[in-house]
Image (tube, helix red, strand yellow):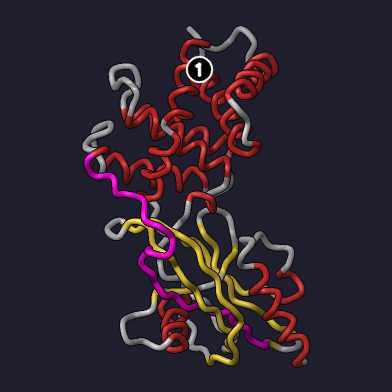
Amino acid sequence: MANRHLSRSIVLQTLFEWDLNDIDKKGVQEVLQRNIEEFAANKTDNVFIDKLLDGVMSKQPELDQVIEKAAPDWPIDRISPVDRNILRLGLYELLFADRKEVPAKVAINEAIELAKQFGGENSSRFVNGVLGAVYKEIGEPGKDEQSTRKKAVPFDQMPIQRLAGAVVYAIEGDDMYLALVHDIFGHWTLSKSKIREEEELEAGATRALKEEIGLAVAIEAELGHNEYVASHPELGKVRKQVTYYLASSTYAELSLEQKGGLDDAQWFKVADILDLNFYEDILPIVTKAITMLVSKR
């Protein structure tokens, strides 16, 4: 009997190249045949592979909508290409495959194994969380999907959510440190939170840092703004506008609040910061903060 796990691995590798390089349908078939010949000649179920690959590609917009609903704080383009396509593959089998052929538990477990094999350190936990949430909350394949789908809203008509956060620094001996948080996608980033109604931005940033990593801070300067689009379970697409500040604190143990896809918080010496894995829109904020701090010393 052909190895279904190996077949799924071939589909995943092909989806990864399709996603990363924007390959057309003919090109996808060429990539698929190359992957089969290179990694699994005569060991795969080609009918299964073709059906799975075509299904994921044809349902990609719907699958991405489900991912956004299940992980509303993480826009689809911020999920690593490997994890993104593992989720698409797993969701396709969970939502659209024949349950007699691929039971829900098998679909989820196979996706988790792919995440362990091809993803990062936290990929399997992330994939398990998203697929588990989908199975629990959405239920049967395609159930009411057409009737519940919201119409696309133009960018300038999307609801706006204000957030605030900060690059926090502290001096310990002769060294300067920055406090960063780590998310389940493998990136170091900045602590932030939604601004409450009638709350000032600086007050919101101060509160967010106290709640999220246990630090009392003093705001010193505004660093800049970021904006991105995310999916809200009730509001649909929303524009998240984030204001970042430079803030000082004492060098104290960080206490991470367990929420929202964060799994670690640490102090880093300034000299080591730029070697870390940041999101593209966060790195300029951190770099500006370091430039300001170096000029002060």
Classify residue 102 as left or right of residue 167.
left
Q: Which residues are magenta?
A: 147-171
Q: Is residue 156 magenta?
A: yes
Tell whether 117 sits left or right of 105: right
Q: Residues within 10 Å of mark 1 (few under 14, many from 20)?
A: many
**Amino acid, disc 1:** Ile
Residue 183 location (% of width, % of height): 52, 60
Query: In the rendered image of this protein, does residue 1 appear above or below residue 180?
Result: above
Residue 259 appears in the rendering: no
Q: Is residue 200 magenta?
A: no
Task: Please tell me which residue is depicted at 70% across the width and 74% down the height of the picture.
Answer: 287
Give the residue drawn at x 29%, y 22%.
Answer: 99
From this view, report whether residue 111 is shown above or below residue 10: below
Which residue shows up at 46% across the image and 31% down it? 89
User: Camera-side residue: 110 or 30?
Assistant: 30
Residue at the image point whose x is 61% and y is 7% from the top: 42
The residue that disc 1 covers is: 49
Q: Quadrant of the C terminus?
A: bottom right
Secondary structure beneath dot 1 equals helix
Q: 134 or 223, which lies in front?
A: 223
Left or right: 85 with respect to 41? left
The location of residue 271, given as percent across then percent down, is 77, 74
Asked if residue 234 shows in the view, the reply is: yes
Query: In the displayed structure, would residue 72 be above or below residue 46?
Result: below
Q: Is residue 257 above or below residue 43?
A: below
Percent x, y of residue 284:
67, 71
Left or right, 41 with respect to 204, comes to: right
Horizontal and vertical percent position of residue 1 = 48, 7
